[in-house]
Image (tube, rainbow, N blue to C red):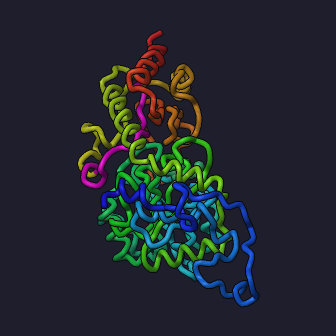
């Protein structure tokens, strides 16, 4: 079956056959008929709420179907998903290893790498997101626990040579983790490329309605067993109410990401021709330096991208963002509503300073009509002419 069909027919209620949707089971405690059953429940008897009741287990099934994963762990936020994947990927005795982190990494993950990894004796080392496999192999000559990938980067949208970098990491004996929030397991499947752990902020496209936070880590084989074990060890759990919302969002994920992606690409190409725009950061545009690699690896675009205002200072970019009406100002993306985010204040770089022709704004195209969104962008850009 095709992925869309699998998505609709996976995550069906496990414990009833007359309801379309799995019920929300609010319980910590699962009662037991005997002590023997209490300590040794015979499947499919459940054990305890933390193990995931309904619809948490149905949600895991549905996400596993998208990735063709052997296990999916749910986490309390996207950030905690990436962190679970990183901690799981570390070897049992990590002291003395390095972790190779893409310099385009999501800011709060960078903070975890800088502040927490050294406590395990692991040194975070940043690499250029567009590094070649050969240059990564050079870095991998030092003992490396894990290579963290994120493609495209969520502020600056560089596309990484995922097959090459994954091969180099494997040959160097390092585990691989990707933050694949942008592709949402729809536009690209990192596990098919041999990446060990795929972490995603379900908060964004999977949820799609900006009404909860959640993350997932998907893996196959030995990595799947490891992430299952570590999530239990670290006490991970998500609310069944949020799991219900996420499963509901997931049913329409392919439709929404396609629509948002189409609108985003149309806005990106109109911005690309706008006199006030120096550069559009969207790998789906033919003018992008990443376009060839992107077309090879991704089946389409998500609706989140950036653009740089020619010769406009940070404050000028923020004034444009504030002038927008339909695009509202706020963190996050992937929801039904369009958002704008001025990015310059949060870009951090280690390998080389971020240089640009002006202020960087990020847009997340929602499900409004593209013409209304374009009218909004045009009137806001007009403030630059007065
Ligand atoms: C939002 C985001 C996260 C974190 O997700 P939360 O649910 O907000 O914690 C991680 N990675 C990327 C790329 C994101 O955009």
Residue lying at the far bottom in this picture: please name it: 36
**Is the N terminus in the top left, top right, bottom left or bottom right quadrant?**
bottom left
Q: Quarter of the image holding residue 2?
A: bottom left
Q: Quarter of the image holding residue 162?
A: bottom left
Q: Is residue 215 part of the magenta span, yes or no?
A: no
Whether residue 128 is visible to the viewer of this picture, yes or no, is no
Q: Quarter of the image holding residue 381?
A: top left
Q: Nearer the viewer, residue 259 or 193?
A: 259
Q: Is residue 142 left or right of residue 231?
A: left
Against 131, residue 269 (above or below) is above
Which x, y percent locates residue 240? 65, 58
Which x, y percent locates residue 85? 53, 67
Which x, y percent locates residue 135? 33, 64
Residue lying at the far front in this picture: please name it: 18
Which x, y percent locates residue 360? 47, 33
Q: Nearer the viewer, residue 332 or 341?
A: 332
Q: Is residue 53 left or right of residue 172?
A: right
Whether residue 25 is visible to the viewer of this picture, yes or no, is yes
Q: Nearer the viewer, residue 227 or 237?
A: 237
Region rendered in magenta: 294-310
Q: Residue at x 30, y 64 (%)?
A: 163
Q: Residue at x 57, y 63 (%)?
A: 74
Q: Is residue 166 left or right of residue 32?
A: left
Q: Residue at x 57, y 82 (%)?
A: 92
Against 205, residue 21 (above or below) is below
Q: Residue at x 45, y 65 (%)?
A: 64
Count of numbered tags:
0
């Amino acid at each position: 079956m095709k992925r869309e069909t699998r998505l609709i027919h996976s995550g069906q209620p496990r414990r009833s056959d007359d309801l379309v949707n799995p019920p929300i089971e609010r319980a910590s405690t699962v009662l037991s008929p005997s002590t023997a059953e209490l300590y040794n429940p015979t499947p499919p008897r459940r054990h305890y709420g933390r193990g995931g009741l309904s619809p948490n287990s149905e949600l895991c099934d549905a996400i596993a179907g998208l990735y063709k994963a052997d296990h999916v762990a749910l986490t309390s936020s996207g950030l905690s998903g990436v962190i679970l994947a990183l901690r799981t990927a570390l070897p049992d005795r990590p002291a003395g290893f390095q972790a190779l982190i893409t310099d385009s990494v999501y800011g709060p993950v960078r903070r975890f790498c800088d502040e927490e990894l050294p406590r395990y004796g692991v040194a975070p080392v940043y690499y250029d997101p567009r590094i070649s496999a050969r240059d990564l192999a050079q870095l991998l000559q030092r003992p490396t626990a894990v290579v963290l990938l994120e493609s495209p980067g969520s502020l600056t949208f560089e596309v990484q040579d995922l097959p090459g970098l994954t091969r180099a990491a494997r040959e160097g004996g390092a585990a691989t983790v990707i933050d694949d929030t942008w592709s949402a397991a729809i536009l690209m499947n990192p596990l098919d490329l041999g990446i060990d752990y795929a972490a995603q902020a379900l908060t964004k496209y999977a949820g799609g309605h900006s009404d909860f936070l959640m993350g997932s880590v998907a893996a196959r084989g030995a990595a799947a067993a490891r992430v299952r074990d570590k999530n239990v060890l670290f006490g991970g759990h998500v609310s069944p109410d949020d799991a219900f919302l996420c499963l509901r969002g997931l049913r329409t994920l392919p439709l929404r990401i396609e629509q948002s992606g189409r609108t985003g690409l149309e806005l990106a190409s109109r911005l690309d021709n706008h006199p006030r725009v120096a550069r559009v950061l969207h790998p789906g545009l033919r003018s992008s330096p990443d376009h060839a690699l992107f077309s090879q690896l991704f089946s389409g675009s998500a609706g989140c991208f950036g653009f740089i205002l020619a010769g406009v200072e940070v404050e000028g970019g923020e004034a444009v963002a504030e002038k927008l009406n339909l695009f509202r100002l706020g963190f996050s993306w992937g929801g039904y509503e369009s958002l704008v985010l001025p990015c310059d204040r949060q870009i951090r770089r280690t390998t080389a300073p971020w240089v640009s022709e002006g202020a960087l704004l990020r847009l997340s195209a929602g499900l409004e009509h593209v013409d209304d969104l374009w009218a909004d962008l045009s009137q806001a850009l007009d403030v630059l002419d007065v």
